[in-house]
Amino acid sequence: MKEGKRQKQVSALLRAELSNIFQKLGLNIIQGGMVSISSVKITPDLFEARVYLSFYQIAKQADALKLIEDRAWEIKRDLVSSIRNQLRSMPQLTFYIDDSLEYVDKMDALFKEINDHKHDTENES
């Protein structure tokens, strides 16, 4: 289903504010790696926001996600204070690991393997 104009506006607002909050709370650097908010998807009723996080050079992504979830009340508190004049109600935040970069890397590796195999069979002919 296509996102509406208001959903896009609220998503962009939440993403920008959450990025600032993550920096302020020191959640953008975890275990020596970086955390960034890759996207925020909001339901049509604006009651739930799914926050997708990208982890760069963090070995234990599930542990980093747990750390963020443990501090969700702080994140929400700061978010409420920063957007209280722009939204009537605060959406429920749910955090997810964005594995799209891993998927892209995996697909690149598969295409390289296929290409290498193709060149090997051509050279044998």
Image (spheres, rainbow, N blue to C red):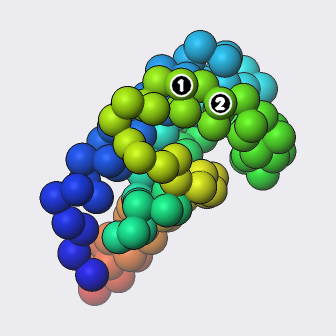
State left or right for residue 94 relative to residue 40.
right
State left or right for residue 110 relative to residue 69.
left
Q: Position of residue 58 (x, y in %)?
A: 70, 36
Q: Which amino acid does label 1 sit on?
A: Ser
Q: Residue furthest bottom?
A: 125
Q: In which quadrant of the rendered image does the N terminus lie? A: bottom left
Q: Where is residue 52 in the image (x, y as percent from the top left)?
A: 52, 52
Inspect this view and state whether residue 62 appears.
yes
Q: Is 57 in front, or is 42?
A: 42
Dividing the picture into quarters, in which one does residue 64 lie?
A: top right
Mark 2 is surrounded, within 10 Å at the Cα level, by few (under 14), some (14 to 19) or many (20 or more) other residues, namely few
Mark 1 is surrounded, within 10 Å at the Cα level, by few (under 14), some (14 to 19) or many (20 or more) other residues, namely few
Q: Is 53 in front, or is 12?
A: 12
Residue in view at x 59 percent, y 55 percent:
92
Q: How many labels does the image show?
A: 2
**Mark 1: secondary structure:** helix
Residue in view at x 59 percent, y 13 percent:
24
Residue in view at x 66 percent, y 25 percent:
27
Q: Where is residue 55 in the image (x, y as percent from the top left)?
A: 60, 40
Asked if 41 appears above or below 81 in the picture, the reply is below
Q: Is 62 in front, or is 13?
A: 13
Q: What residue type is labelled 2?
A: Arg
State left or right for residue 96 relative to residue 1.
right
> Which residue in the structure is indicated by mark 1?
81
Asked if 58 appears above or below 48 in the picture, the reply is above
Q: Position of residue 53 (x, y in %)?
A: 55, 46
Q: Is 65 in front, or is 125?
A: 65
> Which residue in the structure is indicated by mark 2?
77
Residue in view at x 48 percent, y 39 percent:
37
Kindly check if marks 2 and 1 are in contact, taking CB atoms under 8 A apart as contact: yes
